[in-house]
Image (cartoon, grey):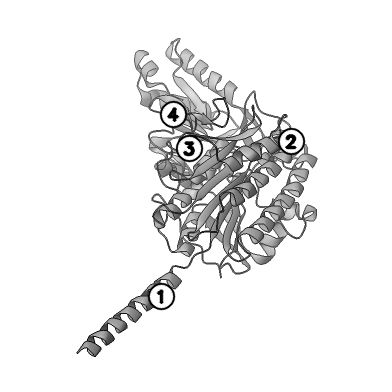
């Protein structure tokens, strides 16, 4: 009998061990996930600037990875905060709450990452009063943490606060961004009370005394900081799958100032190619080639400079946002014989009505909205002025309708979406008119690169339409974990 029980116990033990090994093998994941966002990168830059690339950066990703050549953004506005949040959440502004770089929240104009309840860590400025609290959903980084009982390490790095905070999400170990006034990387008390020793050491060795944002050196600094995080936090060298989210911002600053076809932009991508090669080499050394899963995409793309297009016979132009706002209020004042501004704000092609001023003027929001749309429509540079509450019934192309609906958050997006004619974009007094901008529904703003590389990624490419929301769904599917809680994307089949 004792022998029988001994045999049963031995059998059960072997079975449990086998099941445990099977589960471990079934849940096998890469040691590290690396997300790279190149701010304002058009898809065609992969080919237009290819002649400037070496073999170990963009070319390595394309020759060994899987490229989705028709990757599209399906919302407006196509701006930085929205792009970073949507890549990492697999969602859209209607759900994430990140309706733009700026939006109205509880009746107050709010920057996407503003948080007055936290303090700056790493400098004495107010640049660290930031957190992800305005983001209403989880990100890939959160999903990785949750799936592993919060034991994984997740880090975000960027020059821009929103480029580090939005990807890293709510549960990150840290998000680090650049304090341009002090020339160092900082964070906030949302994440920690003091910088780790490795960050202090990095800042001491790399403190900047000039504005590097509009130069390739900005991307060099981000790459070096990402590598410092990789080694300082020993990412990918524990028992969990960690996540490093990197966003290169200088390409956006340079594009805004100099445009898509300038020598400065060419230099920026030539040098960025070297930084990506350097980062890949560091990952190979620290984690091992094939042991990390990497994707590269963009938060938005960019239009060609309007003056350049006009010079070559292409319909294009600028639309001054400050002038447009003043003209709207001037028209309504005259129409309704009032001294009050009935339009509160104009942000990234979204019009915010002032309901209190409208009521005080003895008018209704509906009549003011209708009159304002008629006025805006008279501008030849405008294709459509679309009240958000009437978008379903208006006669507009389905592709534009879908983007408006996906971008509309009822509590934060305002009242009217302005759609400019193709080739036209909004500028204001702080813009660089020899440069470019973005934010609209057209392909030059919405067609962005997407490359998967590394762990379990076969070489290939597809021209089938994929979406920015599919990135999070794909990564989480590959890791066998639940997608972020607002994800509306579909996993991409890389065959």
Residue that badge 4 annotates? 104
- Which circle's residue, 3 or 4, is located before the other in the chain? 4
Secondary-structure class at tag 4: strand
Secondary-structure class at tag 2: helix
Which numbered tag is attached to residue 258? 2
Q: Residues within 10 Å of mark 4 (few under 14, many from 20)?
A: some
Q: Is 217 left, or right, of 385 in this rendering?
A: right
Q: Residues within 10 Å of mark 3 (few under 14, many from 20)?
A: some
Task: Using the numbered discs, state the Cα–Cα distance from disc 3 to disc 2 in whole angstroms.
Answer: 37 Å
Residue that badge 3 annotates? 192
Task: Using the numbered discs, state the Cα–Cα distance from disc 1 to disc 2 in whole angstroms.
Answer: 55 Å
Question: Residue at the location (43% across, 11% down)?
Answer: 338
- Residue toward you, 78 or 186: 186
Secondary-structure class at tag 3: loop
- Which circle's residue, 4 or 2, is located before the other in the chain? 4
Q: Nearer the viewer, mark 3 or mark 2?
A: 3
Question: Residue at the location (42% across, 24% down)?
Answer: 108
Question: Residue at the location (62% across, 41% down)?
Answer: 422
Q: Residues within 10 Å of mark 1 (few under 14, many from 20)?
A: few
- Which circle's residue, 3 or 2, is located before the other in the chain? 3
Q: Are marks 4 and 2 in contact (CB under 8 Å)?
A: no
Horizontal and vertical percent position of residue 445:
61, 44
Q: Residues within 10 Å of mark 2 (few under 14, many from 20)?
A: many
Q: Which quadrant would the C terminus be assigned to in this image?
A: bottom right
Q: Nearer the viewer, mark 1 or mark 3?
A: 3
Residue 96 position (above or below residue 293) = above
Question: Residue at the location (52% across, 16% down)?
Answer: 330
Horizontal and vertical percent position of residue 169:
46, 44
Task: Using the numbered discs, state the Cα–Cα distance from disc 1 to disc 3 in whole angstroms.
Answer: 38 Å
- Which circle's residue, 1 or 2, is located before the other in the chain? 1
């Amino acid at each position: 009998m004792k022998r029988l029980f001994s045999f049963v116990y031995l059998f059960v033990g072997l079975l449990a061990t086998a099941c445990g090994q099977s589960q471990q093998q079934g849940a096998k994941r890469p040691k590290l996930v690396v997300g790279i966002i190149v701010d304002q990168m058009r898809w065609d830059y992969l080919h237009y600037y290819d002649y400037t690339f070496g073999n170990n950066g963009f070319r390595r990703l394309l020759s060994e990875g899987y490229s989705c050549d028709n990757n599209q953004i399906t919302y407006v506005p196509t701006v930085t905060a929205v792009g970073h949040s949507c890549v990492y959440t697999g969602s859209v502004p209607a759900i994430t709450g990140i309706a733009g770089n700026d939006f109205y929240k509880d009746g107050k104009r709010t920057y996407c990452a503003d948080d007055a309840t936290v303090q700056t860590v790493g400098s004495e400025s107010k640049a660290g009063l930031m957190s992800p609290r305005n983001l209403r959903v989880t990100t890939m980084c959160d999903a990785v943490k949750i799936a592993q009982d919060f034991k994984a390490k997740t880090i975000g790095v960027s020059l821009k606060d929103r480029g580090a905070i939005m990807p890293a999400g709510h549960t990150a170990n840290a998000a680090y961004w650049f304090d341009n006034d002090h020339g160092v990387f900082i964070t906030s008390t949302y994440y920690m009370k003091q910088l780790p020793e490795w960050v202090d050491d990095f800042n001491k060795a790399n403190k900047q005394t000039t504005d590097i944002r509009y130069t390739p050196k900005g991307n060099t600094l981000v790459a070096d900081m990402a590598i410092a995080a990789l080694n300082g936090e020993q990412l990918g060298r524990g028992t969990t799958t960690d996540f490093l989210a990197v966003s290169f911002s200088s390409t956006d600053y340079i594009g805004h100032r100099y445009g898509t076809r300038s020598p400065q932009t060419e230099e920026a991508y030539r040098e960025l190619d070297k930084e990506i090669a350097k980062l890949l080499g560091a990952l190979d050394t620290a984690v091992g080639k094939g042991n990390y899963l990497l994707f590269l995409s963009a938060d938005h793309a960019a239009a060609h400079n309007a003056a350049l297009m006009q010079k070559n016979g292409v319909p294009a132009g600028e639309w001054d946002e400050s002038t447009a706002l003043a003209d709207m209020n001037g028209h309504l004042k005259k129409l309704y014989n009032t001294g009050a501004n009935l339009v509160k704000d104009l942000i990234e092609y979204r019009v915010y009505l002032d309901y209190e001023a409208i009521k005080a003027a003895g008018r209704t929001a509906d009549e003011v909205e209708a009159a304002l749309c008629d006025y805006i429509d008279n501008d030849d540079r405008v294709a459509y002025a679309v009240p958000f509450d009437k978008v379903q019934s208006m006669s507009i192309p389905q592709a534009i309708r879908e983007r408006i609906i996906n971008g509309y958050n009822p509590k934060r997006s305002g009242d009217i979406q302005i759609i400019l004619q193709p080739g036209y974009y909004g500028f204001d007094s702080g813009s660089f008119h020899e440069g470019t901008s973005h934010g609209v529904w057209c392909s030059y703003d919405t067609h962005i690169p997407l490359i998967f590389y590394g762990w379990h990624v076969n070489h290939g490419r597809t021209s089938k339409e994929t979406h920015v929301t599919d990135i999070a769904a794909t990564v989480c599917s590959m890791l066998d974990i639940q997608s972020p809680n607002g994800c509306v994307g579909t996993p991409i089949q890389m065959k």
